[in-house]
Image: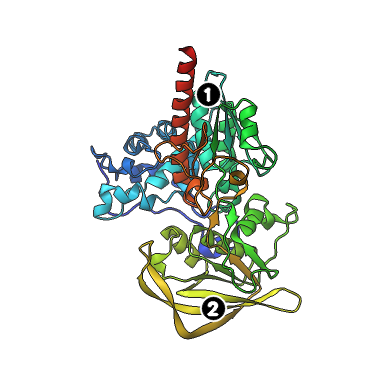
Amino acid sequence: MPNMSLHKVEMPEQNPDVRNKNFKEVALGYDEDMAVTEAQRCLNCKTRPCVSGCPVNVAIPDFIMKIIRGDFIGAYETIKETNALPAVCGRVCPQESQCEQLCVRGKKGEPVAIGRLERFAADYFLANGASKAKKAESNGIKVAVIGAGPAGITCASDLAQMGYDVTVFEAFHKAGGVLVYGIPEFRLPKAIVQKEIDALLDMGVKIQTNMVIGRIKSIDELKQEGYQAIFIGSGAGLPNFMNIEGEDLNGVYSSNEFLTRINLMRAYEFPNYDTPVKIPEVAAVIGGGNVAMDAARCAKRLGAKEVYIIYRRGEQEMPARLEEIHHAKEEGIIFKLLSAPTRILGNDEGWVTGIECVEMELGEPDASGRRRPVVKKGSEYTIDLDTVIVAIGQSPNPLIRNTTPNLETESWGGIIVEEETGKTSKAGVYAGGDAVTGAATVILAMGAGKVAAKAIDDFLSENKEEKRL
């Protein structure tokens, strides 16, 4: 019998006053009974609208029906058919604006908790049924993937399953991309990411770390080494700044540096991990996206007495997930909305001492459809603090585009591709994820990796056929 409750089964979580002092995972996950009860809310619609809302087209009703029957391993295997990273997506995907947004149950009450069920199936498999991924028979064709983030991992996984000899070139010392340097441990444990990376290695994919393509090797040099197709999934790791007075003071971080030190280099465990980071007394994070929420919540966990989110629009306009905003508020983060920084203050030694802001009000919509913030006259105020974290977005690093002839890019740095294939202007080179779109979501990057893998297979298959003729 269907469960016709209007509400999702509540997700167990750490108490906010406990979790804001540790880096353990906030959401604790469903147990078997919770998962089955929530799965029974699914109506198994014939039209399957939820599937069309998933960028990688997971067969959502199918895996949920398997959970209802108690076939938890089978549920995971169904997800894995189209999603290379189920345990990751179950934790960080914005389901509320994708699959769950289209769920029929959401018309009267809450949608089915698709993300929570995906996480449950993945965690159950990793704990009870994990087996090495099968290695496909090799076709002997070499393909290079640049970047071991969500787009690169997905593209490499799909290509490996097709039999290609795939090598992933990762600039950092550890694979995972934004999954390891950007998303905090309390949202996505690094052990989960490592298990997904291990599965990729089991499939025969080779990963070379500390390989900065564009510096150590160029795209053209990879071609000369026999890689017959190349996928660029290098992400958007170049931080944007506000260009206001005081941004060069000590105590001002880009969100990239702050989160990389904490997440990938485990600064929160210093001195066990030899990566120091300044422990703030009072911190302000500039921005309103998920990265801003992550930085603010990390600063709180490091021991900051007060942490502010300063955002120039209102809460309704914030691009962060509702869940992340809710968790940040529960953990004591102070929201200064409709505010914009105008100057960062410092002392004679060059350290941050405060930030000057001005209040804003919303005017007419801008090109994005959101109401444009305008300054409210006479509304200046100052916050005394010692740390400022700038989280207003990232752009693709210019290194690859500056060292790759005939690779067309947008004026802001994104690689120009055919939307249907990920094909770039350079023969045999494909791209996807944040390197193309700018900073976006994990699942959209994964979708781009899948699209490119199929296009690369089509391209190389055509080449093989031409050689036979």
The one nearer the camera, 419 or 90, is 419
Q: Quadrant of residue 193?
A: top right
Nearer to us of marks 1 and 2 is 2
Q: Quadrant of the N terminus?
A: top left
Residue named by callout 1 = 134
SS at mark 1?
loop
Outermost top residue: 469
Is 276 placed left or right of 202 in the picture? Answer: right
Q: Residue at x 34, y 37 (%)?
A: 68
How many marks can you see?
A: 2
**Are discs 1 and 2 less than 8 Å apart at CB?**
no
The one nearer the camera, 246 or 331, is 246
Give the residue type that dot 1 points to: Lys
The one nearer the camera, 428 or 131, is 428
Give the residue type that dot 2 points to: Cys
Q: Residue 55: give x, y in percent of width and height.
A: 39, 42
Q: Residue 357 got which mark? A: 2
Q: Quadrant of residue 406?
A: top right
SS at mark 2?
strand
Q: Residue at x 51, y 65 (%)?
A: 287
Answer few, some or many: residues within 10 Å of disc 2's Cα (few below 14, many 20 plus, some between 14 and 19).
many
Which one is earlier in the sequence, the residue at label 1 or at label 2? 1
Q: Residue 17: give x, y in percent of width and height.
A: 54, 65
Q: Residue at x 54, y 67 (%)?
A: 286
